Amino acid sequence: MRALPVGDDALLVEVASGEEAQALHTELLRRRGEGSLSVREIVPAARTVLLDGLADPARLAAELTTAEVPPAPPRARDVVELPVRYDGPDLADVAAHWGVAPREVARIHADTEFSVAFCGFAPGFGYLTGLPPRYDVPRRATPRTAVPAGAVALAGPYTGVYPRSSPGGWQLIGTTDSVLWDHTRVPAALLSPGTRVRFVPVGSAPMGSATVGNS
């Protein structure tokens, strides 16, 4: 673990993996919740966690670089279910990369419970993990100039849903009508770090909205 100063009151903590970043994020949230850490924002990313608004960044940096961070415990919160049509233009390419039929891509993806590792790229865009490493896929050699809102996509170890139309190079495997970002909603983002997510093929869940179920 390495802690780098950012300005006068922030730290960027680098770790070796996404799992370690999630564990550190969880531990820092726990410390803030119990009152032992005063910080304005804690922002996870792929292999870093940014802490902003620290009174003494140097002291915390020294502490974190020698700290043992426990693994993140399983999340007990409800699962967000996103209805999806597995109709993406890259479904056949992903199937070929996985060595399975297109319908198997849909089955494997829908049978997986995902977790939001971090958010970024665009408001409401979550980077979801959960698929085994053998299902990692490369980005497209030529990105699209416009990916439609609601596109369900894969890149590397991540699944993501485009909250609005934008350029993108991820492999598109499906479409959801769920609204990922709505500034009139509280919170505006449907997904946040730690959220558990399942993709439900249309026919098993109502169209047009996300549902929250217990598990």
Image (cartoon, grey):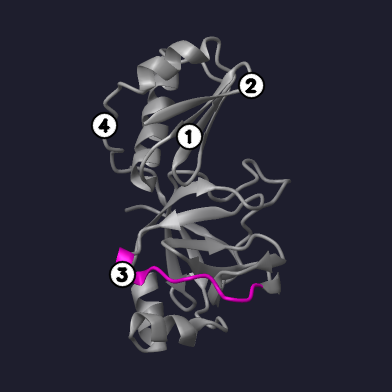
Question: From what the image shows, is residue 101 above or below residue 155?
Answer: below
Return the disc, 3 or 4, that comes first in the chain's sequence: 4
Judge whether 55 appears above or below 96 on screen. above
The residue beneath circle 4 is 70
For marks 3 and 1, the one nearer the N-term is: 1
The tally of labels here is 4
Mark 4: amino acid = Pro
Is residue 165 shown in magenta? no
Viewer can see residue 93: yes
- Between circles 1 and 2, the one closer to the viewer is 2
Residue under pointer 2: 7
Give the extent of the magenta segment: 133-143
**Between marks 4 and 2, how big is the CA–CA gap?**
28 Å
- What secondary structure characterizes most of the magenta part? loop
Q: Position of residue 125 (x, y in %)?
A: 59, 54
Identity of the residue drawn at 45% across and 26% down: 3
Question: In this rendering, would 182 be left or right of 20?
Answer: right
| Amino acid tagged 2 | Gly
**Residue ID for mark 1:** 49
